[in-house]
Amino acid sequence: MWIRRQNAFTAIIERELFDAAHAIIAARSFRMSDDEMLAALKALYEQKGLLSGIIIDECEGMPSSGAFSSRFGSLLRAYSLVGFTPDRDYRYVAINRALRRLHPTILRQILDGLQSQGSDATQDLVTDNFIVNDEFSVSVVIVRCAPTPTGLLRWKIRFDTTRMADIVIVVRMDTANRAPFDYYLFPRIDVASQRLRLAEDNDFNLDAYRFETIDFFYDSAAPVRIPEAA
């Protein structure tokens, strides 16, 4: 659930100026068909020899880069329709978008796993962290698999050390970035830096935190009743 509040931050520019700029951008693509927009984009490509959001936005009379992205689903798809292929591999953009859609599902699975083993686990809707048994907090980081040009697999992790939970569950995705490959459970006290790079096989000081599944975590987090002495 998203909570929105108008004027939560002080505006950088006046509202009237923003609305005027927005109207100009919208007017650039007003009543233009898909074919007309692509024809204009192709002409710009032939003139400049390459395309970018800045090149498009600076061209007088051209629909904005945002208009192309909105009309064709993404700027990269608009590029492909006029025959332009960027030198840089932008496939990660689509992968990151898919992982953001997958994030709530994985959070729900972990929350269900904790609760199914008897833990009192709730989710903080502001941070997405879990509070388990009113004793410790858990955060989840999903990491994209990024093959190197030589075929090796790498996962680059970024930790938010400003508000890190007591335990960080790192979900490494498989080579297709469609399903979890394995899991790392890092206690906050053992996270020494904001960035960490993992390979398929790592030193023991890293792989000691690795698990094929997180069933062990569910079992470890479950409260244990201790009988009282008579």
Image (cartoon, rainbow, N blue to C red):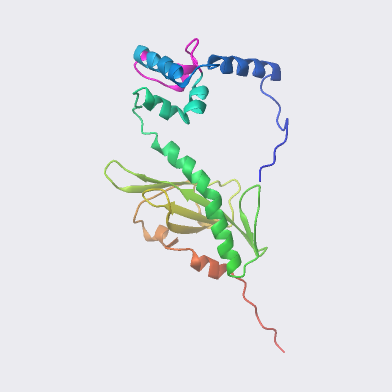
Q: In the image, what residue occupies the spot 59% across and 14% down?
A: 24
Q: Along the line of sight, which residue is nearer the eye, 157 or 75?
A: 75
Q: In the image, what residue occupies the spot 65% across and 80% down?
A: 226
| The residue positioned farthest toward the left in the image shown | 150
Q: Is residue 93 above or below residue 201?
A: above
Residue 49 in the magenta stretch? The answer is yes
> Residue 180 occupies which quadrant of the picture?
bottom left
Residue 163 in the magenta stretch? The answer is no
Q: Position of residue 159 (x, y in %)?
A: 52, 47
Q: Is residue 213 left or right of residue 17?
A: left
| The residue positioned farthest toward the top in the image shown | 60
Q: Is residue 205 above or below residue 35?
A: below
Q: Is residue 69 above or below residue 108?
A: above
Q: In the image, what residue occupies the spot 39% across and 52% down?
A: 174
Q: Position of residue 178 (x, y in %)?
A: 42, 50
- The range drawn in magenta is 48-63
Q: Position of residue 41 (x, y in %)?
A: 42, 17
Image quarter where the C terminus lies is: bottom right
